[in-house]
């Protein structure tokens, strides 16, 4: 629980730990909602009015809706925490549909005894991530479970976003000849978490790639780049994403292993722990399926958002082969089928 | 765990219990999503496409958004289960804003080892409740936590609904002279849960009032009844709701205790366990603040939806008194302030 520095608002300081009463609908719960959640999330806009629903104006457009629960352990990790992750996860899922994320709900399942300062820190981290992604947190819910029945904090965020006329992004729109791009190196989130859990240390510690993808995606969409599909490579890693899209499109995807950037510490950790980096979860990496003519511009846009020296890369191509298959041209010149990962991979990674 | 009768789909029968792998992003998780969630929730409409967001057409209107997590114990109770409750809770919150609920997300936090038949039963119960309330479950998420870190199943539902032009429902619209109605007897949900937990038995067992309020609310709204505010009396009971509205409106609310229907078994259980029925959670009861001229018609509509002989009733009136105060005219002819309930009431009631 180290690394927390947000002061507990004075009005909450009577209760340095979460009590069952913080979830029971009475005055103590109301004070938590008003003094922490509303004060942090609600910049004075009139959407909550202490009501159970937020009422929101939206223009006539299509709406995208996405929901994610977060159960990650540990709650804080190199490069992020459950709060920022819970915002990034949902805004990224919306962005992957071509939607501009607008509104989020945030619902908490708190474990009795959670230090209040941890909750305060996580809530502030959510607010910072929401601001950076351009979304407002407009409604939510708080439940408290007895000590030993939760894991400190579980968060659900559900988001709605607006999809511009003419934007149609889905595996079924993927075409023969589309190029496959990724926006940076793979495997960082999963290996950052596992390194903490397994107490591995590296010369340069592995930092999660958890980030909002809203800005680069919206820039590509506003320039009308001819994108057929996008998908963030979270649980199951790039291998899961490519397999889902190969099945959804009925086409075959060829990937050049040598073009997939993976940093040295991540390769090392994967080797030690026995993971395939293509199966490892990311929280700020996505695959883009795009017409060849627009791939160069897309790579320019992605490069302008790269951090930590992680280069975007064209990693493969869609061909009219065997439906649903992903073929990996390996670094040593052989070919292998890249399968959907099986069951148990990295539990509690998000 | 008794009372479950849904057969496990054949394709899931290899795994009679939830495994960590059911949450890990691989093939086993995908099979759970396809064979249980999509097959149950998705009646062939093209909203999911196995994508992380659902893209939805909405007309130009205001949207209401509401989110709730459900951690109730026990998972099944007289009159419902966590599945139906998780739908009723969110559609009712939307209806209380005057919104017609349209779409729900459903996100699950499952505990490793949960019997698959329990999950199947709960998912089917959600679908039945969603159909009855006229909402579609369009997106969701599944996480699995290790044995001992959850409580079988936690569910988050987040809903969006459409608010008709001209419908403005909020404590701030409450006016002097508004009458206060409720749609039936109070305290059933909380006392049904407590009776199970405390192994109390009564001549007639107490059944939760958990139900969708969408139909009666929409009927009142379509008839343009002059409603200023509605609020469902969930955690904290009627006392919490009235206090919130008294504060939000800046007016005083007078309630006649004798007019509040409470059934005999509920009164008995409250007496034994030391609860004030006005503080006890309901899941199918709401307070309506309405212009006097339309109160009669509202009571007629509410009566047409009553079940179990629970009569709707006019229980009080808004007066221009001391801001934020709720005054109870007791059955024995005295007056008392009805306070906001304090902290610990009934944990894990929803």
Image (cartoon, coloured by chain):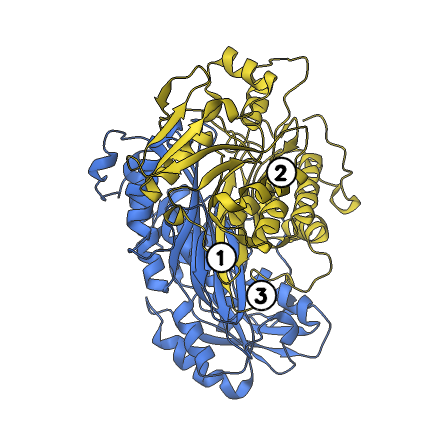
Chain colours: A yellow, B blue
| For residue A191, above or below residue B83 | above
What is the secondary structure assignment of the residue under circle 1?
Answer: loop
Between disc 2 and disc 3, whose residue precedes? 3
Which residue is disc 2 drawn over?
A: A211
- Label 2 CA crowd tier, 10 Å (few <14, some 14–19, many 20+): many
Observer-nearest residue: A248 or A82?
A248
Q: Position of residue A57 (x, y in %)?
A: 59, 67
Q: Nearer the viewer, mark 1 or mark 3?
A: 1
Q: Nearer the viewer, mark 2 or mark 1?
A: 1
Please identify the residue farthest to the top as the structure is shown: A272
Q: Position of residue A37 (x, y in %)?
A: 67, 49
Which residue is disc 1 drawn over?
A: A167
Q: Is residue B237 visible?
A: no
Residue at 38%, 30% in the rendered image: B26
Residue at 56%, 68% in the rendered image: A59
| For residue A307, above or below residue B276 | above
What is the secondary structure assignment of the residue under circle 2?
Answer: loop
Observer-nearest residue: B160 or A319?
A319
Looking at the image, how many numbered discs can be counted on the residues? 3
Alpha-carbon distance for marks 2 and 3?
28 Å
User: Are both tags, 2 and 3, on one chain?
Assistant: yes
Alpha-carbon distance for marks 1 and 3?
26 Å
To which quarter of the image does residue B297 belong?
bottom left
Observer-nearest residue: B148 or B318?
B148
Which residue is disc 3 drawn over?
A: A55
To which quarter of the image does residue B130 belong?
bottom left
């Amino acid at each position: 629980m180290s690394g927390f520095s947000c002061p507990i608002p004075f009005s909450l300081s009577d209760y340095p730990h979460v009590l069952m009463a913080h979830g029971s609908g009475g005055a103590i719960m109301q004070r938590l909602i008003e003094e922490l959640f509303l004060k942090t999330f609600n910049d004075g806009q009139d959407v909550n009015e202490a009501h159970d629903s937020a009422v929101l104006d939206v223009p006539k457009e299509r709406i995208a809706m996405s929901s994610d629960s977060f159960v990650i352990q540990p709650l804080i990790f190199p490069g992020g925490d459950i709060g920022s992750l819970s915002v990034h996860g949902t805004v990224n899922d919306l962005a992957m549909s071509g939607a501009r994320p607008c509104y989020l709900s945030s619902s908490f399942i708190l474990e009795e005894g959670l230090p209040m300062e941890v909750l305060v820190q996580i809530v502030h981290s959510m607010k910072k991530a929401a601001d950076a992604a351009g979304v407002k947190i407009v409604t939510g819910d708080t439940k408290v479970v007895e000590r030993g029945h939760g894991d400190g904090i579980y968060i659900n965020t559900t988001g709605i976003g607006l999809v511009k006329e003419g934007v149609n992004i889905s595996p079924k729109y993927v075409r023969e000849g589309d190029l496959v791009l990724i926006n940076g190196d793979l495997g960082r989130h999963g290996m950052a978490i596992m390194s903490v859990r397994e107490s591995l240390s590296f010369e340069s510690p592995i930092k999660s790639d958890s980030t909002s993808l809203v800005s680069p995606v919206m820039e590509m969409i506003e320039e009308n780049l001819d994108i057929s599909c996008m998908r963030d490579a979270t649980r199951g890693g790039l291998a899961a994403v490519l397999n889902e899209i190969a099945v959804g499109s009925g086409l075959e995807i060829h990937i050049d292993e040598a073009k997939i950037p993976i940093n040295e510490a991540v390769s090392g950790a994967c080797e030690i722990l026995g993971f395939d980096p293509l199966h490892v979860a990311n929280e700020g990496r996505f695959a883009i399926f795009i017409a060849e003519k627009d791939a160069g511009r897309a790579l320019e846009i992605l490069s302008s958002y790269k951090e930590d020296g992680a280069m975007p890369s064209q990693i493969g191509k869609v061909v009219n082969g065997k439906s649903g298959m992903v073929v990996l041209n390996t670094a040593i010149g052989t070919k292998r089928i890249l399968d959907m990962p099986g069951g148990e991979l990295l539990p509690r990674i998000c």
